[in-house]
Image (cartoon, rainbow, N blue to C red):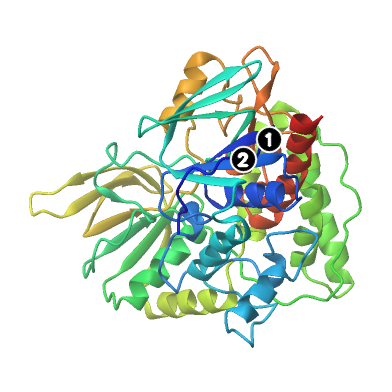
Amino acid sequence: MMRTGLPRPGSGSRRILVVGGGASGVLLAAQLLRRDEDRVAVTIVEKGAMLGCGVAYSTTDPTHLLNTRVANMSAYPSEPHHFLDWLKRQGDADADPDGFVSRPTYGRYMGALLDPWSGGERLDCRRAECVGLDIRSDGVTAHLSDGGRIEADLAVLATGHALPDRRKDPELSQPWAGAEGPCHGPVLIVGSGLTMVDQVLSLLAAGHRGPITVMSRHGLLPQVHRQVAPGGWTPEGPPPVGRVSDLMRWLRAEVRRREDQGGDWREVVDGLRPQIQAIWRDMPLAARRSFLRHASPWWEVHRHRMPPSSHEKLDLARASGQLRLVRGRFERASQDTGGGLVAHVRGPDHRPADIRVARIIDCRGIRRDPEAHASPLIASLLASGEAFIDPLRLGLDVGPDCDVLRPDGSRSERLFAMGPVSRAAFWEITAIPDIRLQAERLARRLLDAVLT
């Protein structure tokens, strides 16, 4: 649960403010605190009731599983068994490092990371929303929704994904907004990624008997995890990326080379993971734009895969005819005269069509315009010129060391960003194995900045 109070650090200590108490913020706070630097205190500002959960792990539905194996979900890169050991301490003696546990379970693990410092002088957790930051040469002042203020030496934005404003599309159900009660009529799910998988599983577990239509532009489903040979696979270095077509041609050749040796394409995708951020960083802007337009849907379904048990349930629903996957573009929704909903869509032939349903669930993923869906804090930073949106409109533009960049290209010495909000600079920074590495590196950078 959220810890409250206002402990006061020792004399001469430095304070680092972390805005956002989801997984990104908690991972960074834990990295800062566990280094035993008594001269540094951490304040986390989070408007939700649970630390460590955020959008991804706040679900209470046990059918929502992690899409990464237990062995790869430790909070600390240097302690790969940390999560597995925690599961065993919670009474799961048979915890499987190759298994997939529920998202609520992982949320409890994230929340427990800060227990060693709970109630101490070095950790202050405030349940409020940060609505503004005054950034000066000598520090930062945070303005909170409850009227409070926090003084800090540095601030880190760990605000997660830009969430849609429900007021703009009131007819759409948002997957993480809480349960809306049972629905027995036809359901349309817009988007076919992992969030859709969770929503279908929730509907099936609740006894939903009506048809479920999943619509996306490309009609692609996430691939499924399979056991692969131990030891992994390290692809030969990719060529310099001038054109995305060259990169994809190289990737297909690597897959063929591995399969010719009796391996699996998953080994190539997983082996490429440590290089993804460097590849993205070296891509010219035109190549990045081309990747987002033409290649990213295929990369996403191979890179972000679903657990085998989830795949089996979806397969059964498809085989029975209850679940149907179609290609198309959702445009808008409206109320019909009978109180139901009408989804206005266009099919692959671009012809308009209307679909009458009882519920529409918006699972279009995380790529939303970060300015149109900006929180009050992000909007204020953009308005003041302390931050700006990257040219591809993925998120805030940040430097390679997570410094927030200003419109003139200068780097802030007091404001940093990590996790999904920094996606424009790192691309693959939405999953725990990537965020935990970023948290470890950023913690070292911040401690060096405030203690030297």
Farthest residue to the front: give it: 11
Q: Nearer the viewer, residue 180 or 33?
A: 33
Q: Residues within 10 Å of mark 2 (few under 14, many from 20)?
A: some
Residue 245 visible here: no
Asked if marks 2 and 1 touch (Cβ < 8 Å), the reply is yes
**Label tally:** 2
Question: Which percent across, then down, holds residue 390?
Answer: 61, 26
Q: Element under label 1? A: loop
Q: Name the residue rendered at 79%, 66% in the picture.
A: 267
Does 317 sit left or right of 298 as displayed?
A: left
Q: Quadrant of residue 332?
A: top left
Farthest residue to the top: give it: 408
Q: Residues within 10 Å of mark 1 (few under 14, many from 20)?
A: some
How far apart are the alpha carbons under marks 2 and 1? 6 Å
Q: Name the residue rendered at 39%, 42% in the picture.
A: 350
For the residue marked with disc 2, what is the amino acid?
Pro
**Image height check: is 242 above or below 171?**
above
Q: Nearer the viewer, residue 43 or 313?
A: 43
For the residue marked with disc 1, what is the amino acid?
Ser
Q: Element under label 2? A: loop
Q: Nearer the viewer, residue 78 or 329?
A: 78
Dot 2 corresponds to which residue? 9
Q: Name the residue rendered at 37%, 57% in the picture.
A: 189
Quarter of the image for the C terminus: give it: top right
Tell me the tag on residue 13.
Answer: 1
Does 146 sit left or right of 342 as displayed?
A: right
Residue 237 visible here: yes
Question: Which percent across, then down, holds residue 376?
Answer: 41, 29
